[in-house]
Structure formats: structure tokens, C-alpha cells
Amino acid sequence: MNQAIEVFSPNRVISKQTVRWMVGFQLVLLFCIWFFSPTVFLPKPKEVWQALGEMWMEGLGGELITSFVLNLEAIALAAVLSLLMAYLTVIPFFRPIVTLLSKLRFLSMVGLTFFFTLMATTGHELKLYLLVFSVSVFFVTGMAEVVASIPKGEFDLARTLRMNEWRVVYEVVILGQADKAFEVLRQNAAMGWMMLTMVEGISRSEGGVGAMLLNQNKHFHLPAVFAIQLSILLLGLAQDYGIGLLRDVFCPYADLTLERK
Amino acid sequence: MVSYTYGKTLLKVDDVSLEYDGRPILKHVTAEIKDIICPDHVQGQVVGFLGPSGIGKTQLFRIIAGLNKPTSGRVTINGQDRPVQAGEVGVVAQDYPLFEHRTVMSNLLLAANQKEKDDKAARAKVVQYLTEFDLLDKASLYPVQLSGGQRQRCAIIQQILCSEHFLLMDEPFSGLDLLMLEKTSELIQKVANMDDLNTIIVVTHDITAAAAVADHLWLMGRDHDARGNPLPGSHIVETYDLIERDLCWNPRIITEPRFVDFVREVKERFRSL
């Protein structure tokens, strides 16, 4: 009874077992709402499951791999470019350039397709450029903010330890913010999946789960749409978990002060 | 009274002035710390640096640490004919900063390696300090896992490992209970007396604690005009030699009436700044 009250009280730290019970209950509740929903536009779990089987036979697995590889490539490239640009903000000359880059996040991807088409030689390259651009403008914004908000005291500590300014950058900006870089990567990698379907819709030559989703959506095959969305969600969660795991391995100090650890 | 003599000048603040947008913050600040030589034991130097809030203590603190440059004048150490550089004077800020992404051992090795060229020698020195300060079993922990006292000791060791025997401590007595205050005073004395050349400048508001731990006190303030209004630009208006007054190197000094009288005298002067 006390635990039931605790899960509804603010700022309570609850045991792992309570978390398991709570999440289990919420999943069952969600499933029940889905199963018993009177809405005709919401396909029932059984229909989605059947559609998933059919889609799998039609090559959903392969399309998921194609999309996953494309997303991974884009995230890796975007991460390298964005981190580099964000770290370069320690040099005053690059700050306006990075500020400009971060403002480009307001641009529509569709409007940029033409320019990227001119640059790309294959459909894969076009999708990659579009994704890298879309993820990078958000990634660089988040990471530049992380760099800008490092307290003066951290730089001073490095300086009092006889470090030259390049070493200060390495110690304070790169190593010192590695945990936050992983967190920004995590957020933007998720955004990559969101944009992937749009990008795969723009260039369908290679297929991919995005093209598949748009096809099903066009023909209003809602169970299939749900099945694909569910697959993307599961793959995205696995990717999110993987990045989280990397963060825990390389930055074990990151969550030591968190109340809800 | 313990016999002592003064040796060479270890640190010299030489006519330092600082201006921001034409507004004087520090004006012709001059002070020095000489090596105190006691024939029968190792004796470091501890200076208590006092002054009201907003007087410019932090600005002078940063200039002594080599973190900021003065508008004119300079700070020199060990008789060198060049201004002090960042890293030569250790700085222990109020919140005892450490690199949160490194373990205690890694934090200290980083500092030791900046001074020691040999990695093996650096490690040996770190282990020696960790043992000396009762932190050896904490070597693999991250700073966030340390208690306040452990973190304080770790931050002090890190700076001592890297600096040239100089340590600036910013408000080390702030917010401490009586027991912790005594422990911090003991720690300052311990660090100071580890080497004849060890020199600690304690920036604080706590006159009693500073007088109990220091051999000299610097009082920073401003001059006043005929109407009693403060003139812009601070400097060290008073220096107290506690050795001369036989008020230092005695752990029980704070209970003696002459110490209480001295603290009262400094407080009176402090109020007039």
C-alpha cells in the first residue's frame, strides 16, 4: 500500500522491483486500451501481428537492415562533423560559423533536395547527405550549447595544472564533456530515425523501411503501417540502449550524482 | 618564543594595479612573503588574506595565481625576473574542484605528471601523498563519491603536486562547523609544514580562523577621503606579523586572552575599511 502511494508522490525514489511492477502494469493497461479500443482506425493487435508476419515475408527484415545501416552511417558521420564543429567553438573565428550552421535547422529538407541531388552520385549518397545534414544541424546546436555552458572554474582548474590551452580544450571540453556528448548523440540518433522515413521517401531507389512505410500509408494499410512503426520503434530502442551502454562503459561517473539512478 | 630568521623572498606582489573599463579595482598593491627559517624544524609559511566582500580579493587572488594579468605591476615567485605563470601557484577554490571524469588516482597522476617527467616517480609521489592524507583506499573512486573533507584533501594534494610550493586557498573555512574548521586549520598547517618552502595564502572572511592558522595577515581595503568616503582602488592597508607578536605556531593560542585581544584589534581595523 505504501509503495502504491509512493509511485504517485513527487520526487520519490522507488525500488527496482516496484519499477518492474509499475511498468508491467502500465504495459498491460496500454495493451488493454489498444485491444478494447472502439476506434475503427486503430488496428487490433492481432491484425498488426498478422501484418507483421506478411511484411516480414515481403522483406521487412532486409529493409530494416538497409535503413539501420544508412542511419548508422549518417549518425557516425554527423557525430564526427558535429563534434568537430562544436569543439571548434573554443576558437572565436568558428563561433559565427557554428551559430549559422545551427540556424539551418529551421530549413526544410525538401527544399534542400535539389542541391544535395547535384552533389550526390547515387541514391544512397543523396539519402546519406540529407540525413547527415538534418541530424548535424541539431547535433551541433546541442553540443555547442554543452561547450558554451562549461563553467569557468573547470578551465581554471586545468590552467592551474600547467596545461596549455590546447590541453585545456582536450581535458575540459573533449574528455570532460564526453558523457554529455553521448547524451546529445543519443537524442540525435533517435531524430535520425524520425527523418529516415522522410529521406527514404524522397529517394526510393534503395528501398528501406521508410519507402515501405510510405507505400503502405499511401494504400491506407493501417495494420501494416503499425507493424512497420512497431519494428522501427523496437530497433530505435535497441539503438538507444546501445548508445546508453557505450556511455556507461566510457563514462561510468556520469550518473553517480543522479537521485533516480 | 621560537627562534626564527627570515630568508629569501618567496613571493612578491610588486605594485600591482588593475583596472576594468578605466575603473580602478586594485591600486598599487604591494606585499611579500619571506621564507621563515626555524633552525630546529621544518616551517612553512601561512598568510591570511582578509578583506570585506567586493574589495578585490578575488582579483588579486587570480593575479597571484597567474590566471589574470594586472594592468600594471607584477607578481613574482622565488626571485624570478618574470611574472608568475598559471600552474606555478596552486589554487584550491571554495568548492574544491577536481576533474569529475577522472578517478582520484587519475586526477592526482595528471597533476604529478605535469611536474614529474618520469611516470613511475609521479605515481610514487601520488601514493605517498594519498597515504599521508589517508586517502589511499579512495584512489579508485570518482570525486563525486568522496566526502567533503576527502574532496578537500584531494584538491589540495592535486595542486601541491603541480605547483612550486605555493597554494592559494579560497575561503577554506566557509560554512564549516567547529570540528571541521579545526580539522581544516590542522590540514593547512600540515601542508605548510611538509616543506620549508611551502607557502599557503588563505583568502577568508573568518578573522579568528585566519589568525589561528597564519603567521602573517594581510588586510585589504580602500583609502578614504576627508569625508570618509572610500576612494576607488584597493590595496593592502595593513600587514600583521603574528610571529613578532608571539601569536602563532601554538595550537592553544586561540584560548589565550592576548589572542582574543589581537582578533578584536583586527576586527576593529576591518570595520574601518
Image (cartoon, helix red, strand yellow):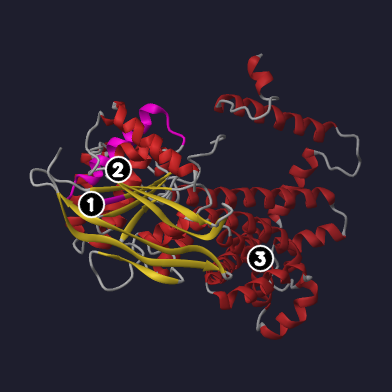
What chain does badge 1 belong to? B
Can residue B271 be seen from the camera position used here?
yes
Q: Which residue is drawn at 81% across and 62% down?
A: A215
Element marked by disc 2? loop
Indicate the position of residue B69 as horizontal and vertical percent values: 43, 69
Indicate the position of residue A34 as horizontal and vertical percent values: 81, 36
Write down the residue under mark 1. B198
Magenta-drawn stretch contains B191: yes
Q: What residue type is labelled 2?
A: Ala
The CA distance from mark 1 to mark 3 is: 53 Å
Q: Which amino acid does label 1 sit on?
A: Asn
The CA distance from mark 2 to mark 1 is: 13 Å
Which one is earlier in the sequence, the residue at label 2 or at label 1? 1
Q: Residue at x 66, y 27 (%)?
A: A22
**Direction from residue B266 to residue B162 in the image, left or right:** left
Query: Are there few (<14), some (14-19), or many (20+) residues within 10 Å of tag 2?
Result: many
Indicate the position of residue B70 as horizontal and vertical percent values: 44, 68
Q: Which numbered marker is on residue B214?
A: 2
Element marked by disc 1? loop
Q: Magenta residues, as a range? A: B175-200
> Residue lying farthest top?
A1
Query: Are there few (<14), some (14-19), or many (20+) residues within 10 Å of tag 1?
Result: many
> Residue lying farthest front?
B226
Q: Which amino acid does label 3 sit on?
A: Val
Magenta-drawn stretch contains B182: yes
Write down the residue under mark 3. A135
- The residue nearer to you, when weighing A215 against A1, is A1
